[in-house]
Image (spheres, rainbow, N blue to C red):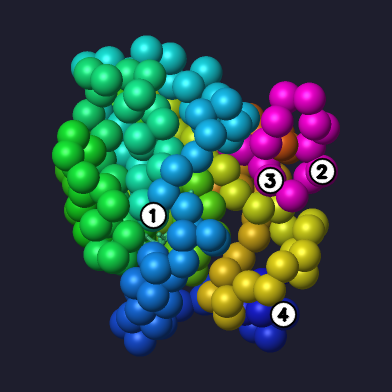
Amino acid sequence: MGLFDLFSKKKPELTADLRERIRRSFEEAAADEEHFPSTINPRILHVRVLVETFGDLNGKRVLDAGCGKGRFARALLAEYPAAKFCGMDLAVAMLRHVQEPLWPTAGSLTQLPFQTGAFDAAYATESLEHAVDIEAAVAELCRVVKPGGAIVVIDKNKDHWGRFETPEWERWFGQQELEKMLRRHCREVTSRPISYWEDVDPDGLFLVWIARK
Ligand SMILES: C[S@@+](CC[C@H](N)C(=O)[O-])C[C@H]1O[C@@H](n2cnc3c(N)ncnc32)[C@H](O)[C@@H]1O
């Protein structure tokens, strides 16, 4: 449960001021390679679940929503060199790492700068937790994917809230809570705990939600 929920039952509002504070915080965070890395081991299950869910992406358009430095898109591109990956993020300093043949785009999760059905698939890894207006961000993620396309969200489980220090706007999600939001836009939704490595049982911190539009 985030601070917003503790002190107010009102839906948190992504005001221009809050959006600007979030953006500035990630512009600065881009210099912190330790906590915001530009690479990821492609054998990590967070990457494998995207590969397995999406299947052959060659010739397809894929959105990495809240891409940071684009580490997931680069790992997927190495497996599907003929796919077109758009890395979208609020912070321009993050996007400096997202270079050709990736397609960097500045924008907000709650108002994606793309046409409806522009992508064959989309994913958001540890970015939805910063979107504040989660329902709007989920609706947008689903809107920009074609019917039949897959949407994957990897994020933290609210049952583990408090495990790390978090900025005031961050929210973690209940497994059913996010399933319910995705079901408003998608015909099939599943979710499960996920660990980093095949031989390590999930400790429940990370969940993966897989939706088919
Ligand atoms: C923890 S990082 C994760 C980055 C990347 N998905 C990864 O796993 O490496 C969160 C990212 O979400 C971006 N972000 C936060 N709020 C956003 C928003 N409203 N719209 C777009 N991007 C946002 C931040 O700038 C940051 O790059």
Q: Nearer the viewer, mark 1 or mark 4?
A: 1
Quadrant (top left, top right, bottom left, bottom right) of the C terminus: top left
Q: Quadrant of ligand 1?
A: bottom left
Give the residue number, with chain letter if any, for mark 2.
203
Considering depth in this image, is 11 or 99 the residue closer to the camera?
A: 99
Who's the residue at 39% across and 82% down the image?
A: 21
Q: Secondary structure at mark 1?
A: loop
Who's the residue at 53% across and 52% down the image?
A: 126
Q: Is residue 209 magenta?
A: yes
The boundaries of the magenta stretch are 196-213
Give the residue number, with chain letter if any, for mark 1.
68
Please name the amino acid that badge 4 sits on.
Leu
Question: How many numbered callouts?
Answer: 4
Q: Does the beta carbon at disc 1 come under 8 Å from ligand 1?
A: yes
Q: CA distance from mark 4 to mark 3?
A: 22 Å
Q: Nearer the viewer, mark 4 or mark 3?
A: 3
Q: Residues within 10 Å of mark 1 (few under 14, many from 20)?
A: many
Q: Is residue 70 magenta?
A: no
Q: Nearer the viewer, mark 2 or mark 4?
A: 2
Q: CA distance from mark 1 to mark 4?
A: 28 Å
* Drawn side of residue 204 relative to residue 22, left or right: right
Give the residue number, with chain letter if any, for mark 3.
206
* Drawn side of residue 74 relative to residue 160, left or right: left
Pick whichever of labels 1 and 3 is earlier in the sequence. 1
Give the residue number, with chain letter if any, for mark 4.
6
Quadrant (top left, top right, bottom left, bottom right) of the N terminus: bottom right
Q: Does the beta carbon at disc 2 come under 8 Å from ligand 1?
A: no
Report if the CB atoms under discs 1 and 3 are less than 8 Å apart.
no
Report if the CB atoms under discs 4 and 3 are less than 8 Å apart.
no
